[in-house]
C-alpha cells in the first residue's frame, strides 16, 4: 500500500471546511490529508461517488463488561446472523450485540472510522480496552461512569471541590478514558439499597450520602469544563423513559448555567404526560431550549423498530423494562461505582409508546436548527443497532419515505406529535454534519470529522444513489489513517484501531485519600487499579487544559 | 536460601477464581523460587511455594527433545492437516493467550472449548435462558446482609472467599462484618464450611431443583405441600423461614458451586437458582454468583464470548462460530471420535475426562501447553513446557465476578508463554493455509 493517494472526481462533503458537494481532489499522504501530491501519485477515481470524512459515532455500547454480558445472553440473536472469516479478517457473529471483530468490520462497512463506548465502570476499564483491542479498524475511546461514585460523593458532601477535581482527573488518567459519563446520577444508592428504589427528583437526597443529583451534575459539568476536557460531561439524565421526564431534562440543562454539557439519547428524555401513563411529545420544548442555548449539545438516541437490547448503567430503568417484557434480565452491581441492567427488547410499530418514541426522535432531528449540536445516534443497541443508521439517514433525507413509514405506526401516537407537519429533508451536507463533522467537533477531535489539511485521512466514499439507505449501507471505499481497508466493497486489509484517551494532570496527594478508601471498600488493591500502557498499545492522548 | 531476594507486592494469586491481588511474595532470585507468600491461603501458599522450574525440555516431539521452533512447525503442520482440530483448556492461562487460542481456532476452522464445559457450563446455559442478577465481590463486602452458599465448600475450595470478600470483612453498610450478616449453607452434607454458617440446610442428594422450585413458589406466595420434606429432606418450615429471611434482607446473595451445576438437573438447577434471585428483586435487592474454580476460567468465558458471541463449546467448521453444548463441547467431540487433532492448553483432560473421551485422545495427535508434565502431556505428540501465568508471565485474569486484574510475575521463566507459542503457531497456520 502506497503512503500516497489522490482521490479524484468525487463529490466532496466536508462541512467543517465549508465544502458542500464540490468536485475536487482529496490528497492523502502518510496518514494525513495534505494540500497536494506529486503528479505521479496513485489515484482513486471517485467519479459518481460522494466523498466524506469517516463517520464518528459519539455514543454507542460496543465494548466492556455489560456489552459482553448482553452478548452472552443472546445466542438466539447470533445464530441468525453469522459473519464468516476471510483470508484477512476474523469471523464472528452479529445480531444487535455483535462480537468484537464483527462490530469493527460492520462499522467500517458503513463508513464509520471512530466510535465511542459510552458507559464503562472504571473498575472494568481493562475489559473495555481488551475488547476494543479486538474491535478492528475503528479508532475508539470510552467514557467512564462517575455520577454514582461513592468516593466522589464523599468529597462532594464536604464541598471539597479542589480534591474533587483531582480525583476526577486521577480516574480519567488511571483508566485511559476519554470523558466523564453520568447515568441517572444518584440512583445506584437507591437501587442497591433495600427494595430496588429509584431517584425521581433532582433535589432528592441520595441514600446514605448528603448529596443530590443536582449537586452531582453541577460538580461534574464544572469539572469537565475546568479540566479543559475535549468533550464536556456526557449526561444520561434522571427519569429516562418516564412520562413527564422532559421537565427533568430541561432542569438538568439549566444546571449547566451556560457551561458546556452534552445530553445523550435525548429522545428518551423528551416525554410529556403523567408518570405511569402514556407519554406525549415534548420535542418542541426540548428543541427550543437547545436551539437557544449553544452551550448544550445532544445526540438523539433514535428508536428504530425491531430488535434492540437495552443495556445501561441505569439499573432501575432496566428493571422497569424487565417488568414490561417479563423475560431475560441481567443486573450487575459494580462496587462503589455503578449499576448495570440488560433487557432484550423489541420496538414495535403498533405499540403506542414505541411509535411515539420513534416519532419524537425524528421530531428532534427535524426541529434542530443547528445540526452541529444534534448528533445522529440510536444509543446502539438500546434504540436499535448501529446497522440501522442508513435507514435513519433515509428517514431524514426522504420526506416521502418518512410519510410511508409513519403510515405504518400507531396512529394515536403519531397524532400526538407534529411529525407529519415537518417537511424538512436533510441534505447530504447536514448528514455529513450529524454523522461526522458534528460529533468530531463535540468530542474535541480536531483531526477527525473533516478533510482539511492535517486531518487524519479517515475517508469514506459512497456510490451516489437516489435511495439513501442503500447508499449509506455499504461504502465502496473506506480509508482509515491513510490506509485503504475497503476496496470496491471488499476488505483488503485488517488492523487494530487506536485508543483515544485523555490524561489530565492531578495532584498526587489525592492518591493518599483514595488508597484508604480502596482498602476499606473496594475488593482489589489500589495499586492494581490503574491501567498501564500495555492495554492501549496504539494510543493517542488528546490534550486537555485551557 | 540465597541473599539475592526480592519482594513483589500486590501480586495476584491465580490458583482459584478468587484471584486475590494482595499477595506479598518473597522471591529467591538465585534459586528461582518463592520462599514466602504473605496473605496467601493454604491453596495459594502451595501454588506459590511449591512452584519449581521443571528440569524439562522446552519442547518434545513424541518424547524426543526438539527446539521450540521445530515443535511450532510440527504443531502447525499437524493442525493444518487435521479435518476437525480442537482446542481445549484455557482456564489457567492469561486472557492474552486465550485471545490467541480463539484466533487459532478461527483460522483453522476448528473447535474451541474451555473447562467451563465441565464445571459451570450449565450456569452459562442457564444464564442464556434467564439472565442473572449479580454483583462484584466488593459490593457483597459492602452491602450483603444475607449470604447463601449452595452446593459449594469455600472453606476448602476458595478459602479466602469468606475472609476477604463475603463473610467476615467489614463493609460500607455492614460495618460490623460477620455480626451484620446471616450466613446460610445449603449442601448435601456437612463440610468444613458448615461451621461458618448460621443456618445449615441439608438437602437430599439430587433434590436441589425441588428445593429451589419450592422456594420460588413460597416467594411468590404459592402454597407448597408439606410433603416436600419427604422428597428433599428439608422441612417446609425451614424453607418458609429462609424465604422470610430472603424477602426481608437488605442485600441478599446466592453463591453457588458445582454441587449444584454438576448434579442431577444441571442447567435446570442453575436456572432455578438464578430465577429465584431474580424473583426476589420484587421484594428487595438480590444477586447471585457462580463461584468459579480455575484462576482465569472467567476470563476464558469472557474472551470466547467477545470474539465469537458464545461462552464455550464453539465450532468454526463452517468458517463462522456456532455454539451447541453437547455437540461442540470437548468431552462429546472426543467421545464420539470426531476430533482428529487436539491442542490442550494448561489443562489435563487425560486425567479427568470420561474414559471414552480419553481413549480417543490417545488415538489422535495431541499438542500440549503446560508448565508441568501431566497425564495429557505424557501422551502428547508435541509437548511444550510453558511459563506459568501469574508467577512468570504477566497478563490479565478475570476474577469470578468479571473484574479484570493484571498479573505481576515474580521471576522470569526460561520457557515461552502460552501466548507467544499460540501466536507463532497461528501465524504459521495462516501461512500454510493461505499458501
Image: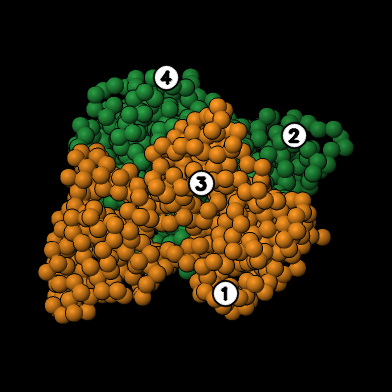
Chain colours: A green, B orange
Q: Nearer the viewer, mark 1 or mark 2?
A: 1
Label ID, residue A30: 2
- Residue corresponding to mark 1: B357
**Is A302 placed left or right of B33 in the picture?**
left
Q: Within the image, what quadrant is residue A473 found in?
A: bottom right
Image quadrant occupied by the N terminus of chain B: top right
Discs 1, 2 touching: Cβ within 8 Å: no
Counting other residues with Cα less than 10 Å from the Cα at mark 1, is it few (<14), some (14-19), or many (20 or more)? many
Q: Earlier in the sequence, mark 1 or mark 3?
A: 3
Give the Cα distance between marks 4 and 1. Answer: 59 Å
Counting other residues with Cα less than 10 Å from the Cα at mark 3, is it few (<14), some (14-19), or many (20 or more)? few
What residue is at 38 percent from the left and 64 percent from the top? B258
Label ID, residue B50: 3
Q: Nearer the viewer, mark 4 or mark 3?
A: 3
Give the Cα distance between marks 3 and 2. Answer: 53 Å
Give the Cα distance between marks 4 and 3. Answer: 43 Å
The answer to which of A191 and B263 lies nearer the viewer is B263
Give the Cα distance between marks 1 and 2. Answer: 55 Å
Secondary structure at badge 4 equals: loop
**Is B386 placed left or right of B51 in the picture?**
right
Mark 1 falls within which chain?
B
Amino acid at each position: 500500500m502506497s503512503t500516497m493517494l489522490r482521490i479524484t472526481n468525487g463529490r466532496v462533503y466536508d462541512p467543517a471546511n465549508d465544502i458542500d458537494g464540490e468536485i475536487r481532489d482529496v490528497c492523502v499522504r502518510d496518514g494525513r490529508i495534505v494540500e497536494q501530491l506529486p503528479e505521479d501519485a496513485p489515484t482513486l477515481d471517485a467519479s459518481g461517488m460522494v466523498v466524506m470524512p469517516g463517520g464518528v459515532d459519539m455514543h454507542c455500547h460496543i465494548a466492556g463488561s455489560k456489552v459482553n454480558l448482553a452478548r452472552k445472553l443472546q445466542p438466539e440473536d447470533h445464530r441468525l446472523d453469522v459473519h464468516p472469516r476471510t483470508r484477512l479478517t476474523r469471523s464472528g457473529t452479529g445480531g444487535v450485540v455483535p462480537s468484537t471483530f464483527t462490530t469493527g468490520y460492520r462499522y467500517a462497512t458503513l463508513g464509520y472510522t471512530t466510535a465511542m463506548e459510552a458507559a464503562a465502570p472504571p473498575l472494568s476499564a481493562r475489559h473495555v480496552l481488551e475488547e476494543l483491542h479486538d474491535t478492528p479498524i475503528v479508532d475508539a475511546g470510552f467514557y467512564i461512569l462517575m455520577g454514582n461514585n461513592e468516593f466522589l460523593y464523599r468529597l462532594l458532601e464536604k464541598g471539597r471541590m479542589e480534591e474533587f477535581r483531582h480525583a476526577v482527573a486521577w480516574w480519567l488518567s488511571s483508566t485511559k478514558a476519554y470523558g466523564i459519563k453520568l447515568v441517572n446520577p444518584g440512583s445506584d444508592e437507591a437501587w442497591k439499597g433495600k427494595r430496588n428504589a429509584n431517584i425521581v427528583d433532582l433535589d432528592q437526597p441520595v441514600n446514605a450520602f448528603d448529596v443530590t443529583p443536582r449537586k452531582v451534575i453541577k460538580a461534574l459539568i464544572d469539572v469537565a469544563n475546568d479540566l479543559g476536557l475535549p468533550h464536556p460531561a456526557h449526561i444520561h439524565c434522571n427519569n429516562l423513559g418516564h412520562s413527564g421526564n422532559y421537565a427533568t431534562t430541561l432542569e438538568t440543562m439549566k444546571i449547566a448555567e451556560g457551561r458546556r454539557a452534552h445530553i445523550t439519547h435525548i429522545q428518551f428524555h423528551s416525554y410529556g404526560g403523567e408518570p405511569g401513563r402514556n407519554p406525549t411529545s415534548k420535542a418542541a420544548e426540548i428543541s427550543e431550549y437547545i436551539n437557544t442555548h449553544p452551550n448544550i449539545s445532544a445526540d438523539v438516541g433514535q428508536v428504530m423498530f425491531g430488535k434492540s437490547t437495552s443495556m445501561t448503567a441505569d439499573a432501575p430503568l432496566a428493571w422497569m423494562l424487565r417488568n414490561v417484557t417479563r423475560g431475560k434480565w441481567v443486573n450487575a452491581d459494580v462496587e462503589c461505582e455503578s449499576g448495570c441492567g440488560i433487557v432484550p427488547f423489541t420496538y414495535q410499530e403498533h405499540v403506542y409508546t414505541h411509535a411515539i418514541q420513534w416519532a419524537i426522535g425524528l421530531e428532534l432531528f427535524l426541529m434542530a436548527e443547528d445540526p452541529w449540536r444534534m448528533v445522529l445516534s440510536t444509543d446502539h443497541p438500546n434504540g436499535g443497532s448501529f446497522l440501522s443508521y442508513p435507514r435513519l439517514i433515509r428517514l431524514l433525507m426522504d420526506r416521502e419515505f418518512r410519510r410511508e413509514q409513519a403510515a405504518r405506526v400507531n396512529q394515536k401516537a403519531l397524532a400526538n406529535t407534529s411529525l407529519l407537519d415537518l417537511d424538512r429533508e436533510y441534505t447530504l451536507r447536514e448528514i455529513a454534519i450529524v454523522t461526522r463533522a458534528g460529533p468530531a467537533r463535540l468530542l474535541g477531535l480536531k483531526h477527525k470529522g473533516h478533510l482539511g489539511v492535517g486531518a487524519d485521512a479517515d475517508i469514506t466514499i459512497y456510490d451516489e444513489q437516489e435511495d439513501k439507505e442503500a447508499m449509506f449501507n455499504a461504502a465502496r471505499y473506506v480509508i482509515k489513517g491513510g490506509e485503504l481497508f475497503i476496496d470496491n466493497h471488499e476488505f483488503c486489509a485488517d488492523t487494530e484501531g487506536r485508543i483515544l484517551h485523555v490524561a489530565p494532570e492531578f495532584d498526587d496527594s489525592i492518591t493518599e485519600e483514595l488508597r484508604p478508601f480502596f482498602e476499606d471498600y473496594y475488593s482489589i488493591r489500589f495499586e492494581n487499579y490503574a491501567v498501564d500502557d500495555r492495554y492501549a498499545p496504539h494510543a493517542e492522548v488528546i490534550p486537555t487544559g485551557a | 536460601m540465597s541473599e539475592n531476594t526480592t519482594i513483589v507486592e500486590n501480586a495476584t494469586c491465580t490458583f482459584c477464581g478468587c484471584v486475590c491481588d494482595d499477595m506479598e511474595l518473597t522471591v529467591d532470585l538465585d534459586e528461582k523460587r518463592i520462599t514466602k507468600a504473605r496473605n496467601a491461603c493454604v491453596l495459594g501458599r502451595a501454588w506459590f511455594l511449591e512452584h519449581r522450574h521443571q528440569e524439562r525440555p522446552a519442547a518434545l516431539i513424541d518424547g524426543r527433545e526438539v527446539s521450540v521452533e521445530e515443535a511450532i512447525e510440527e504443531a502447525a503442520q499437524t493442525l493444518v492437516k487435521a479435518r476437525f482440530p480442537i482446542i481445549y483448556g484455557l482456564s489457567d492461562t492469561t486472557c492474552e493467550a486465550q485471545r490467541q487460542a480463539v484466533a487459532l481456532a478461527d483460522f483453522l476452522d476448528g473447535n474451541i472449548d474451555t473447562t467451563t464445559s465441565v464445571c459451570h457450563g450449565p450456569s452459562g446455559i442457564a444464564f442464556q435462558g434467564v439472565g442473572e442478577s449479580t454483583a462484584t465481590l466488593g459490593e457483597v463486602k459492602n452491602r450483603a446482609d444475607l449470604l447463601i452458599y449452595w452446593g459449594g465448600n469455600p472453606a476448602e475450595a476458595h478459602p479466602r472467599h469468606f475472609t476477604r470478600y463475603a463473610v467476615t470483612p467489614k463493609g460500607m453498610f455492614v460495618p460490623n462484618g460477620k455480626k451484620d450478616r446471616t450466613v446460610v449453607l445449603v449442601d448435601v452434607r456437612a463440610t468444613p464450611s458448615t461451621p461458618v454458617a448460621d443456618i445449615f440446610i441439608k438437602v437430599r442428594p439430587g433434590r436441589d431443583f425441588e428445593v429451589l422450585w419450592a422456594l420460588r413458589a413460597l416467594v411468590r406466595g404459592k402454597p407448597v405441600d408439606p410433603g416436600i420434606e419427604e422428597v428433599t429432606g428439608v422441612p417446609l418450615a425451614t424453607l418458609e423461614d429462609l424465604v422470610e429471611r430472603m424477602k426481608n434482607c437488605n442485600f441478599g446473595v446466592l453463591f453457588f458451586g458445582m454441587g449444584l451445576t454438576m448434579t442431577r438437573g444441571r442447567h435446570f438447577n442453575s436456572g432455578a437458582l438464578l430465577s429465584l434471585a431474580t424473583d426476589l428483586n420484587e421484594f428487595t435487592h438480590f444477586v447471585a454468583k457462580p463461584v468459579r474454580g480455575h484462576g482465569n476460567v472467567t476470563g476464558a468465558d469472557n474472551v470466547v464470548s467477545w470474539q465469537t458471541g458464545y461462552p464455550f463449546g464453539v465450532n468454526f467448521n463452517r468458517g463462522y462460530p456456532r455454539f451447541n453444548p453437547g455437540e461442540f463441547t470437548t468431552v462429546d467431540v472426543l467421545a464420539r471420535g470426531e476430533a482428529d487433532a487436539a491442542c490442550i492448553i494448561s489443562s489435563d483432560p487425560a486425567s479427568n475426562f470420561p474414559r471414552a473421551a480419553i481413549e480417543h485422545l490417545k488415538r489422535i495427535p495431541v499438542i500440549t501447553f503446560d508448565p508441568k508434565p501431566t497425564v495429557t502431556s505424557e501422551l502428547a505428540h508435541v509437548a511444550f513446557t510453558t511459563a506459568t501465568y501469574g508467577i512468570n508471565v504477566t497478563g490479565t485474569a478475570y476474577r469470578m465476578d468479571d473484574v479484570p486484574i493484571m498479573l505481576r510475575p515474580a521471576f522470569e521463566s526460561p520457557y515461552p508463554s502460552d501466548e507467544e507459542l499460540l501466536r507463532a503457531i497461528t501465524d504459521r497456520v495462516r501461512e500454510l493455509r493461505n499458501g
